[in-house]
Image (cartoon, rainbow, N blue to C red):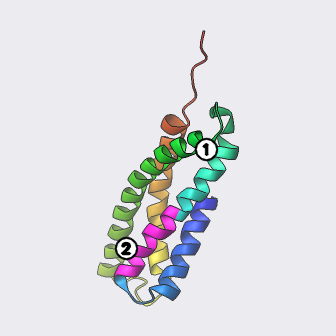
Amino acid sequence: MVGTLVDLGLHWALSSFVFDGNYWGSFWIAPVISFEVAAMANFVIAYFFVWKERVTYRGRRSFWRHFAGYNAAGVGAFILKFIVMQGVHFLFLSLGWLQEYSFEPVICNLIGLCFSGLFNFYMSEFVIFNKKKPEQ
């Protein structure tokens, strides 16, 4: 939830104020920046709160090792989000929907986030912070 809010809020701010009216800025650069900032926020929450019992050793090396895996999965999630986001944008463009509104990139981003969020959850739950089987 936090990551979604960070992603959508930062994407809106960037596409509305920094890249206003610029396709490349609003649909290529802003999503990359907003997604990476949101991924870092999500990871910090996951590492210290959500899956804290699954991290056996805490230290700088552990943090960055887990973050590398989380960020690698995040790249996959971002590619999925980006493909869906671009597809939705071109669908809206061909149908003439929401083209006069500045929040159209954010709507496309939100729809893409639905798909990437499910992928990211799966990767975190079953790969990155996978429960270790107790040693016998």
Q: Indicate whether residue 89 is drawn in magenta.
A: no
Which residue does the numbered mark 1 point to in the structure image?
60
The type of residue carrying mark 1 is Arg
Q: Is residue 99 left or right of residue 9?
A: left
Which residue does the numbered mark 2 point to in the structure image?
28
Assess disc 1: are there few (<14), some (14-19) or many (≥20) residues with their C-alpha within 10 Å of its C-alpha.
few
Residue 113 in view, yes or no? yes
On the image, which quarter does residue 60 sit in? top right
On the image, which quarter does residue 47 sit in? top right
Task: Judge whether 132 appears above or below 64 on screen.
Answer: above
What residue is shown at x 63% (from left), y 47% (from top)?
46
Residue 80: % across, % down: 37, 57
Q: Is residue 21 left or right of residue 11?
A: left
As drawn, the label of residue 82 is: none
The type of residue carrying mark 2 is Trp
- SS of the residue under disc 1: helix
Q: Which residues are magenta?
A: 24-36
